[in-house]
Amino acid sequence: MVSPARRVAFQILHDVEKGEFAADLLFQRTPHLSREDAGLATELVMGVLRYRPQLDFAIQFFGGRPAAKLDPEVANALRLGVYQLRYLDRVPRHAAVNESVDLVKLAKLTSASGLVNAILRKVDKRQLNWPSKSVELCLPEWLMLKWISNFGSDRIETIAHTLLQTPESYVRVPPGNVVIHNTLEPTEVPGAYLVRNEPNSSDLPCRVQDISSQAIVPLLRIEPGMTVLDTCAAPGNKTAQALESTTQVVACDASLPRLRALRTLGCPLVVADAATALPFDRRFDRILVDAPCSGTGTIRRNPEIKWRVRHSDFQVQQERQVRILRHALGLLKPGGRLVYSTCSLEPEENEQVIDIVRRWGITVLETIRRTPGYEPGDGFFAAVLTSQMSA
């Protein structure tokens, strides 16, 4: 009999391989589970995705077979088993082994159940000599080398090890709200609180939003009465944050289904792809371009990104980001402020985009970078732009 947590984790890993995102699937498929099972399912899914190279090396070390040569369902059952046996202390050994065998049977691959059982019974917690630095850091080799070039070999160690950790939880409390809650701790970003002890989300007097995400909107310096355009608004956290300072916010997004989630905010919603055009005949005091990007700064939350992203993706993203900025800057009032931001660690999507904008005669007032392991929260980049210097 397979426990609900392991069954859900196994199914999610299968669907992630087909292109789904683990965090979305966990949100959709764990509410019916007990809190303990939901926590275990999350731990298993995220752990397997974070540590996959080490798990695959352990499968070959103990079993003599490369994970890549196994059926995907067999490989995932083994990864789940190895993760529990080597990385978790609270899981009984028999449960990790027997239920991994049962998962293979559940996938109608009974012929492989003996193999899974034999490999997992050999797995122990001895220190393994990883075959490469990329396996040790659990990164694709090309991405590891790119980050060493970008950040240096010392910093890459800190960044990579940070990305293997469970991210802290942060929430947004609008200014003026009194917070008396023993699980919330104030941070250096006004309105951003670190969540301690992981209470039930229904107990929180606020919305979940990473601290790095919360650090972007203040760069706009919104004042009451100003008009604000959020060009890539979904899922709406930054839109809601902008509404704390002014009621004149317009939210755009290319996706109607994603935009529908913003209806409760009470601001005008416009379906528009900013990379193509923006349907406005007026200008705005403040514009936020929280651009679509590779998301490499969010790998702690979305570890599958590091196995999906390709080097060519960064140039494709850059071209789209530049188009979005060109359209958005055309709607900025003289002396207004536009904030360009991404949750990417890549220069192609950050500094190189801003270098292109400078050639248009746009003034860059400031840039910030938040790097995992060096600043709390996700990795983020932001640049404050204006068409002419403000007073």
Image (cartoon, rainbow, N blue to C red):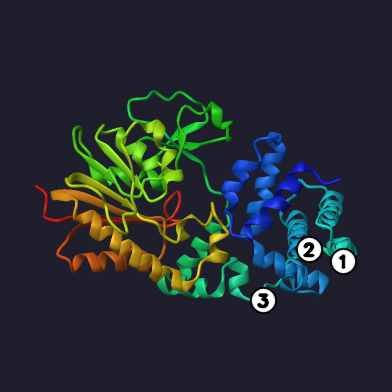
Q: Which residue is the site of mark 1?
A: 115
- Label 2 close to label 1 by CB (< 8 Å): yes
Q: Residue at x 49, y 25 (%)?
A: 181
What residue lies at 20% left-to-right and 66% top-to-bottom?
A: 358
Q: Foreground mark, 2 or 1?
A: 2
Where is residue 66 shown, x and y percent of the image? 75, 74
The amino acid type, in three-letter code, at marker 2 is: Val
| Image quarter hosting the N terminus | top right
Which numbered marker is on residue 131?
A: 3
What residue does disc 2 label? Answer: 74
Q: Quadrant of residue 314?
A: bottom left
Q: Nearer the viewer, residue 251 or 257?
A: 257
Q: Residue 22: x, y in percent?
A: 60, 52
Q: Nearer the viewer, residue 31 or 57?
A: 31
Image position of 119 with respect to 169: above or below: below
Q: Residue at x 55, y 28 (%)?
A: 202
**Local SS, label 3:** loop
Q: Secondary structure at mark 2?
A: helix
Residue 341: give x, y in percent of width and height.
Answer: 33, 54
- Residue 146's place in the image compared with 257, above or below, is below
Left/right placement of residue 102 relative to residue 281 reads: right
Q: How many marks?
A: 3
